[in-house]
Image (tube, rainbow, N blue to C red):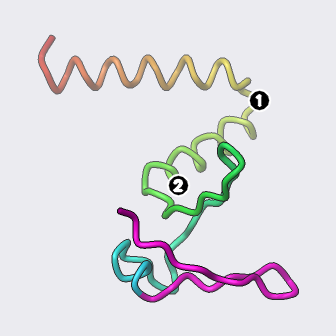
Amino acid sequence: MVNVKHVNPTVRGQITIPKEVRRELGIKANTKLKIYIENNRIVIEPVSHLDLLFKDIEEEAKAKGYTEEELCREIEMAREKLVKEIYKK
């Protein structure tokens, strides 16, 4: 069963992530977190290095005038090339 922790938001909507949760997930003071709503729940999770990399790539592509579709196509082609190189297919 999930170990449920209860927290109360402050007047400004801030919450404290309990120490046990921070320790279990390796969350430090400088850990980037993302927050979103999923199925009427608030989800908070650490941002992966890949998330940060893709954010940087997306920002650079937008600055150069690429559309989201063009960016997705380029990422897919790069992924396919990498998989072929790794698995020699």
Q: Main SS type for the magenta part?
A: loop
Point 61% across, 60% down: residue = 34
Please tell me how many numbered marks the rendered image carries: 2
State the CA–CA distance, disc 2 to disc 1. 20 Å
Of 62 and 11, which appears nearest the observer? Answer: 11
Whole-percent x, y for residue 50 in the image? 44, 49
**In this picture, residue 59 sits left or right of residue 74:** right
Helix, strand, or loop for circle 2? helix
Residue type at mark 2?
A: Leu
Whole-percent x, y for residue 37 in the image? 70, 51
Q: Quadrant of residue 24?
A: bottom left
Point 66% across, 35% down: residue = 61
52 is higher (above) or lower (below) than 63? below
Quadrant where the image shows the C terminus: top left
Which residue in the protein does label 2 denote?
52
Name the mark nearer the viewer: 2 or 1: 2
Over which residues does the magenta segment extend? 1-19
Of 59 and 40, which appears nearest the observer? Answer: 40
Which residue in the protein does label 1 denote?
65
Whole-percent x, y for residue 74 in the image? 52, 21
* Residue 14 forms part of the magenta stretch: yes
Q: Say few, some or many: other residues with alpha carbon within 10 Å of mark 2 (under 14 / 14 to 19 / 20 or more).
A: few
State the residue lying farthest toward the front. 1
Residue type at mark 1?
A: Gly
42 is higher (above) or lower (below) than 50? below
**In this picture, residue 65 sits left or right of residue 73:** right
50 is higher (above) or lower (below) than 46? above
43 is higher (above) or lower (below) than 67? below
Point 64% across, 19% down: residue = 70
State the residue lying farthest toward the right. 11
Point 59% across, 50% down: residue = 56
